[in-house]
Amino acid sequence: MPRSLNGTRIGLLAVAVATTLAMTAAGPATAATAPVSHVHFVSHLNMAEGQRPENITLEPGGGADVTFAFSRQVARVGPDGQVHVLATLPAPPAGAGTPVLSSPFLGGIVRAHDGTLYFLYATGNSDLTGLWRLRPGGTPERIAALPADSLPNGLALDEQSGLLYAADSVLGTVWRVPITGGTPIKWATAPELEAAGFLGANGIKIHKGAAWVSNLDKGTVLRIPITRHGAAGPIDTRATGLVNIDDIAFTGAGDTLLAAINADNEVALVRPDGSHTTVLTAADGLENPTSLAVRGTTAYIANGAYFTNNDPNLLAARITPGE
């Protein structure tokens, strides 16, 4: 999620023509830094139709499911780069304003093993804001309500426990919801999760018995242990100096992760000791990266082009799994 949405909203209203390109076999001129290499476009998306990807989850067959933040759509991008809209969420009533962003916002998305998609929708309206579910071949339904003044952003699934975790960028909270739906609980609240001018808690992943959360304003990566009884343990700040950090994704079984640095058109490699280096830049095709997903030795990067207003896209790159 970018620091300001003025460019996004102007772009969505003003752009009259955009071209959807087929998948490119070769990548852009690359400046990728080890352990990232072989960057290539999976799909160039249609900006005129509001195809600005905010979050991503992967399909077993090589495709990816994404949320288009401000067109209220969930879509699947096939291995061939073609886009298929799976669902469009209902528009909020006139006068509803999403906190901070104003426009309705479709955020984090995850996929369960049975193909069910879960995603977060914020509208400033109590009848629509919350956790939504889309079963294969079905229609979207809200399964948990969140407060109208919340901004649910990143979403993580712990399928083993049957729980979903949502990072709230405005209320400085991590919400927990059963995969079956129901009443959310405030699983974690702390100053480390709060905003400092724009948005706080943003991306979230469940990894090795903990929830890992990025804070956009504070430029931090936080680790929140999940205790034996399921409560949130003490927050540990694992990395700093990553201002404008959006989503995160682990490169392997260890604690090395990739971080999307939205406004700066960068992806950073963050090591277990908190040190970090830039491994992808605009020269690799980054256009305000919003989210990442990793499968095996491939990392996928969704680019919303919120500021560049140029080429929202989905990139893939080869990675070496980190420790």
Image (tube, helix red, strand yellow):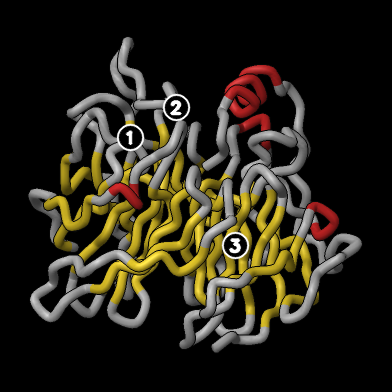
Identity of the amino acid at label 3?
Gly
Q: Is residue 146 visible?
A: yes
Is 47 located above or below residue 35 in the figure? above
Choose between 188 and 128: the one closer to the eye. 188
Identity of the amino acid at label 2?
Leu
Q: Residue at x 39, y 52 (%)?
A: 154
Q: Name the spot of residue 130 as percent of width and height, x first.
A: 24, 41
Q: Which residue is mark 2?
A: 101
**Relative side of 174 to 254, left or right:** left
Q: Residue at x 38, y 49 (%)?
A: 201
Choose between 187 and 48: the one closer to the eye. 187
Q: Name the spot of residue 321 as percent of width and height, x first.
A: 60, 86
Choose between 56 and 256: the one closer to the eye. 256
Q: Residue at x 52, y 52 (%)?
A: 219
Q: Which residue is mark 3?
A: 78
Q: Which residue is mark 1?
A: 122
Choose between 109 and 172: the one closer to the eye. 172
- Where is residue 281, by image quadrant? bottom right
The span from disc 1 to disc 3 (Cα, nearest Å) is 27 Å
